[in-house]
Amino acid sequence: DGSVYAIGTIFTNITKEEEVKRKLLLELNTDSLTGLKSKKYIIKKINQFIKNETDFSILHLDFNQFNLINDSLGHTVGDKVLKKIARMLKDFFGKDV
């Protein structure tokens, strides 16, 4: 009958691309100093909770005059203090804080 049939398959390994995508999302959603969720991520999640009518809670911490630590002891010490606070929050609330 003269018909020609062909079957072809192409496989693409996207493991590396998915890992790059995951790392980029992590960087976008995480504060680079503390490892806590970024303000942008938190606002996005709040909007999702409101849209989906999901119950949620917010803990807002404000360290009055934190600049005194930076000014008197230096930014390196201030950064260490922030990292310690972040570690304590993660230990208490879990990794998704």
Image: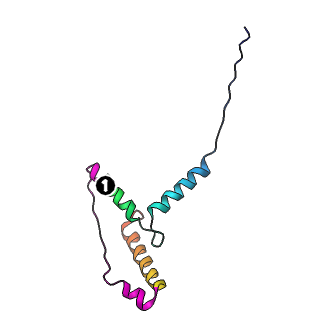
Q: Residue at x 44, y 61 (%)?
A: 29
Residue 67 included in the magenta stretch of the image: yes
Magenta part, dominant SS: loop
In this view, the residue in front, 51 or 55, is 51
Residue stretch rendered in magenta on the structure = 49-74
Numbered label tally: 1
Horizontal side of 13 relative to 78 (left or right) equals right
**Quadrant placement of the C terminus:** bottom left
Horizontal side of 30 relative to 23 (left or right) equals left
Q: Quick one: which residue is furthest to the right in this view?
A: 2
Q: Quick one: which residue is furthest to the bottom in this view?
A: 72
Q: Would you place residue 94 above or below residue 71 in this image?
A: above
Relative image position of residue 19 (x, y in whole percent): 57, 54
Residue type beneath disc 1: Asn
Q: Residue at x 38, y 65 (%)?
A: 39
Q: Tell me, what colour scheme is on the image?
A: rainbow
Q: Would you place residue 66 above or below residue 87 in this image?
A: below
Q: Residue at x 32, y 84 (%)?
A: 65
Residue 82 included in the magenta stretch of the image: no
Relative image position of residue 66 (x, y in whole percent): 36, 83
Q: Would you place residue 66 above or below residue 40 in this image?
A: below
Relative image position of residue 87 (x, y in whole percent): 43, 74
Q: Residue at x 60, y 49 (%)?
A: 15
Instruction: Count residues near mark 1 (Cα–Cα under 10 Å), then give few for <14, some for 14-19, many for 20+.
Output: few
Q: Would you place residue 71 above or below residue 11 in this image?
A: below
Q: Secondary structure at mark 1?
A: helix
| Residue position marked by numbered label 1 in the rendering | 47
Horizontal side of 63 relative to 74 (left or right) equals left
- Specify the quadrant of the image occupied by residue 44: bottom left
- Specify the quadrant of the image occupied by residue 95: bottom left
